[in-house]
């Protein structure tokens, strides 16, 4: 009875995820318009489009390492092809849906539990990859904001004139995490669960993986800026990270509108707003919509395969 209930729950979650992904895709296309996105892509030189697609593919490949590193942390083996499938679908969905921890954990529960990973371990995986994301944000963001402190535009209300104070705060958080990993060796307790503190080696790998994630994601938008844009990459990375932080805080799906506003405000002196908006439109199509379409197809094929496999097993 318990096995049958679990099987029904898996099928229900799969159907809900597929339906939610279709809704998110519809919302994304409705917000900007399919025609406008297609036009923005057609306007790109083939070399620029190829580079943006290459950086996007590399970034989503790096994103699968969040989960691979989490399995290393919980000391459980699962073939990388399975980890990569679940992770890619999870990130393609959560990047668009907002409330990324909730949407991402739903995808992972659907896949990992079906592959025999206990619920407690899945919870640890979700906490670990979420932590990895912020470790990279604090460490890399701290370095960028300290070394290349951006001036805060007049249209944004902040308690400081540059982002350097925020950089020191972020960097302190990143260093503190590494120190805890180096010197704290007993597990932490959270609502009855025990979580081992990652070793310093794993913590450093978290910084590397998350740092590469941020740099590759920003590189997608950077190459889409018009050729005449005089924006060095490191300050641009700071703008990108700040815009993503604003989008995350807003919890608006994919930071729609919030991300764009911050980017336009910080780049308005170097790049005319219409050109920035054109690059942002192409970025949305390449980095969000295309991976979501691929993930939606993969999820549908996976669910269809699982349905056929269970029917064949029932007949045997």
Image (tube, helix red, strand yellow):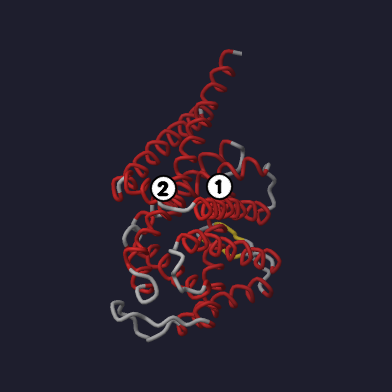
The residue identified by callout 1 is 87
Q: Where is 189 relative to 125, above or below?
A: below
Q: Residue at x 51, y 81 (%)?
A: 148
Helix, strand or loop under label 1: helix
Q: Which residue is drawn at 53% across and 18% down?
A: 311
Count neighbours of disc 2 (C-alpha within 10 A) and say few if under 14, some if 14 to 19, many if 20 or more.
Answer: few
**In the depicted view, which residue is nearer to us: 271 or 20?**
271
Q: Where is 159 relative to 15, above or below?
A: below
Q: Residue 174 carries which label?
A: none
Q: Where is 12 relative to 31, above or below?
A: above
Asked if residue 164 lies left or right of residue 263, the reply is right
User: Residue 193's quadrant in the figure?
Assistant: bottom right
**Residue 23: image location, x then y, percent:** 34, 41
Tell me how many marks there are: 2
The residue positioned farthest toward the top in the image shown: 315
The residue identified by callout 2 is 42
**Residue 263: image location, x then y, percent:** 38, 68
Helix, strand or loop under label 2: helix
**Is any atom of residue 60 visible in this view?**
yes
Count neighbours of disc 1 (C-alpha within 10 A) and say few if under 14, some if 14 to 19, many if 20 or more.
Answer: many
**Residue 192: image location, x then y, percent:** 53, 57
**Is any atom of residue 124 visible in this view?**
no
- Upstream in the sequence, badge 2 or badge 1? 2
Q: In which quarter of the image is the C terminus?
A: top right
Asked if residue 286 lies left or right of residue 277, the reply is right
Of labels 2 and 1, the one closer to you: 2
User: Residue 208's quadrant in the figure?
Assistant: bottom right
Asked if residue 60 lies left or right of residue 76, the reply is left
């Amino acid at each position: 009875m318990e096995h049958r209930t679990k099987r029904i729950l898996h099928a229900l979650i799969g159907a809900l995820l597929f339906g939610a992904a279709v809704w998110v895709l519809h919302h994304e296309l409705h917000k900007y318009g399919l025609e406008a996105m297609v036009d923005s892509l057609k306007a790109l030189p083939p070399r620029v489009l190829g580079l943006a697609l290459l950086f996007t593919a590399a970034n989503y490949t790096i994103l699968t390492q969040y989960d691979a590193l989490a399995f290393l942390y919980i000391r459980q083996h699962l073939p990388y092809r399975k980890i990569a499938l679940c992770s890619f679908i999870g990130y393609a969905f959560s990047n668009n849906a907002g409330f990324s921890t909730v949407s991402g954990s739903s995808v992972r529960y659907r896949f990992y539990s079906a592959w025999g990973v206990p619920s407690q371990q899945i919870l640890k995986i979700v906490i670990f990859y979420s932590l990895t994301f912020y470790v990279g944000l604090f460490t890399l963001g701290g370095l960028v904001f300290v070394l290349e402190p951006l001036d805060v535009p007049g249209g944004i209300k902040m308690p400081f004139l540059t982002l350097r104070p925020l950089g020191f705060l972020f960097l302190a958080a990143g260093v503190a995490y590494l120190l805890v990993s180096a010197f704290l060796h007993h597990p932490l307790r959270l609502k009855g669960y025990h979580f081992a503190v990652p070793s310093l080696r794993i913590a450093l790998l978290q910084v590397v993986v998350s740092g590469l994630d941020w740099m590759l994601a920003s590189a997608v938008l950077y190459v889409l800026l018009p050729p005449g844009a005089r924006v060095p990459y490191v300050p641009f990375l700071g703008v990108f990270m700040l815009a993503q932080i604003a989008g995350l805080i807003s919890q608006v799906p994919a930071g729609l509108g919030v991300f764009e506003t911050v980017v336009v405000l910080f780049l308005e002196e170097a790049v005319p707003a219409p050109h920035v908006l054109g690059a942002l439109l192409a970025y949305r199509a390449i980095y969000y919509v295309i991976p979501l379409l691929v993930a939606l197809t993969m999820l549908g094929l996976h669910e269809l395969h699982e349905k056929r496999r269970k029917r064949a097993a029932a007949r045997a």
